[in-house]
Amino acid sequence: MTYKEMVSMMRMDDTHRFGKVMLDQFEWRDAQEGAAVAWDAQGWYGGDYNKLWIKTEGERVAGITHNATVDVLFDRVVGRWWDAQGGIRQDFGRGPARTWLALGLQGLAPYWLDAEATFYVGEEGRTAVRLKADYDLLLTQRLILQPYGEVNIYSKSDAGREVGSGLSDLELSLRLRYEVRREFAPYLGVGWFKRFGTTAELARAAGEGSDEVQLVAGLHAWF
């Protein structure tokens, strides 16, 4: 049987290309310096084994973009549950722009935990690590509680971007969403946002909070 005959009979084609856009978080936050809008989104296009993957996250407060990033990555399946990713990250918003090389893993850890670990190499010998994880706890078929965690670590301080060396910042949050449709889910939640060391000192000098509990409300969507 030829490949075309198999595809026609089984209606399966592992060379077919497709894509998806995921707005994981698009939310209002009750930040110390005023109402903030934050986002965490990603999209990909490709086949079963190789994809182009784009990620972005950031925050806007009083019309000013803070600590926003875009990662453009090549994604390759390396195991049943894991993908390897490599590419470029660009920091933008307040402060000088920074460009990094990125290398990481993304996948499904035991107990259905979505996890990401990315290592970055930047200019002037800078390196960084970003770790992210979340879990969907189904209370009902449509009501879902999602614990989320993110931590960032930097090898060098960068005062222009209000980043200190070592453990820089941590987010631990809970979001309760209701899936009106699988693709569309408003949510409410609460988050603990903590900055450490020099990062905390730079934030306080700029009039920003370094240890806050914030209410959040937003939208989770995909298509």
Image (spheres, rainbow, N blue to C red):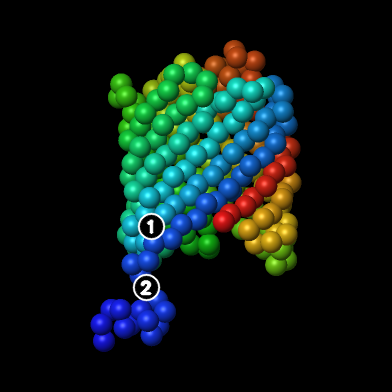
The kind of residue on which mark 1 rests is Gly
- Quick check: 14 above or below 20? below
Residue 13, position as x, y percentages in the image: 37, 73
- Comes first in the chain, label 2 or label 1: 2
* Residue 150 visible somewhere in the drawing: yes
Residue 140, position as x, y percentages in the image: 72, 66
Res. 13 mark: 2
According to the picture, the residue beneath numbered tag 1 turns out to be 46
* Identity of the residue drawn at 33% across and 45% down: 86
| Image position of 139 (left or right of 164) | right
The answer to which quarter of the image holds residue 51 is: bottom left
The crowd level at tag 1 (other Cα within 10 Å; few <14, some 14-19, many 20+) is some
Residue 30, position as x, y percentages in the image: 73, 31
Residue 92, position as x, y percentages in the image: 47, 26
At mark 2, the secondary structure is loop
- Residue most toward the top? 205
* Identity of the residue drawn at 44% across and 32% down: 153
- Quick check: 217 above or below 50? above
* Identity of the residue drawn at 38% across and 50% down: 52
The answer to which quarter of the image holds residue 179 is: bottom right
The answer for how far apart the CA atoms under marks 2 and 1 are is: 13 Å
| Image position of 38 (left or right of 10) | right
Nearest the eye: 44 or 57? 44
Nearest the eye: 124 or 181? 181
Q: Quadrant of the C terminus?
A: bottom right
